[in-house]
Amino acid sequence: MAHLQSLNILETSHISPLKGTVPSTTLPLTFFDAPWLTLPLGESLFFFSYQNSTERFLRDYLPNLKQSLSVTLQHFFPYAGKLITLPRPDPPYLRYNDGQDSLLFTVAESLGTDFDLLITDSPKDISVLHDFLPKLPPPHVSPEGIQTRPIMVIQVTIFPGRGICIGNTSSHVAGDGVTFTHFMKYWMSLTRSNGRDPATLLLPSPPVHSCRNVIKDPGQVTAGHLERFWSQNASHPTSENMVRATFTMSRNLIDKLKSLVTTEQSENQSPVSTFVVTLAFTWVNLIKTLVQESSETEDKVEDKDEQVFNLMINVDCRNRIKYTEPIPSTYFGNCMAPGIVSVKKRDLLGEKGFLVASDAITWRIKDMLSSDLLKTAPSWGQGVRKWVMSRFPTSIAGAPKLGLYDMDFGLGKPCKMELVHIETGGSIAFSESRDGSNGVDIGFALEKTEMDTFVSIWQHEIKKFNK
């Protein structure tokens, strides 16, 4: 297990765009951003193999990593800025001040932590990762009650002769997973180029900030989220007895699940996606686990077979909603619509639970994609509140299509990636499989006894398809 005293802080610095390259800018929060004022931070760790010494890393690799981050922040400047929270009724906003704001960047050395333990898929205590995750400083509060808080912090930890970890903590208010992945891939591309002129490189397209003012609130959605933000002291505690593990669904298993769904479908239905069957299989097994682990209180629940379990999925609204101009795929910010999938207990845990879940998820996605998302936006909050109040609410973090393992900073692709915030958000982490086999990796953080039960159920259900 990692301990604080096993971490040696080598340096802290502040990285910002070169002065004069980005004008001081303020950006309003949209109705897509406002919900995240009361929700957990985004936290991620990317582990890479690096078999050289700390001294060599500091001399040969770190300067380029920092320089490329500075250039990247010229385009992704809100990550070097601040979230400004004013006394009510004035709404919060994002601000970048040229020559003043910067991103806190820490370099540390791990002394004795087992790198192989950190990158294993097997269950491990959640605390083993926490030393390598940078902490977002508390907000600065002015005499007038104005709170100023950094948007993002980064920590690079060296494991001499074994590897490095790039840890990131950021306020989700600034941007969603699409925006964060865009930032990481831009930084990655510049770092891998090792100082070559950016004008000569094939880089990802820069982000678009200008259309933020175009996104109009369709019905006082922001006001409701701001009221909740002002009225509550949001905290997201985690259990002290949690473990995390990663499970891989192979391409062979995914294809078998797809085939099963296709066999049960009517002929005019479109093929089911990898995302749908992977999520359906995972959700059913998770709910089976949680119900089994809470069986001692089950008799206290009235009409237990009529219970409804809710799963929250998100649909990217980029290029799907239009104002005076479409929201482009490179938009910097949050642009996700929540959708709630609801299934009764007797159906979800029944003999055909996987098929029921698959159909429900497919229907919900199709319904969202075919509807006018702006017209439905005022009802999103009601759906989310229903989800929060339900038993075992489940949500998704990440997605296979984001390419979270496509992060070659010149050291090869990550040997492990962790979305740490699933510990507090109650989410399931999804990514493409790290072994490059076109499967899907699924990450969980559960109580120790729950994880033991889940492993048993997961293995039992997979064996059914491998006979």
Image (cartoon, helix red, strand yellow):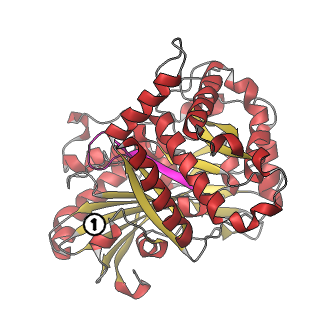
The answer to which quarter of the image holds residue 446 is: bottom right
Residue 345 higher or lower than 122, as above or below:
above
In the rendered image, is residue 247 in sight? yes
- In the picture, the quarter occupied by the C terminus is top left
Q: Position of residue 265 (x, y in %)?
A: 53, 21
Q: Position of residue 13 (x, y in %)?
A: 39, 69
Q: Is 243 part of what is drawn in magenta?
A: no
**Residue at x 20% of width, y 55% of height:** 411
Residue bearing the label numbered 1: 164
**Residue at x 54% of width, y 28% of height:** 318
Is label 1 in a helix, a strand or a loop? strand
**Residue at x 43% of width, y 30% of height:** 258
- In the picture, the quarter occupied by the N terminus is bottom left
User: Which region is colored magenta?
Assistant: 427-440
Judged left or right of residue 355, residue 455 is: left
For this rendering, which residue is in front, 443 or 158? 443
Query: What's the residue type where badge 1 is placed?
Result: Ile
Residue 107 higher or lower than 214, as above or below:
below
Q: Residue furthest front?
A: 467
Q: Is 434 part of what is drawn in magenta?
A: yes
For this rendering, which residue is in front, 24 or 462? 462
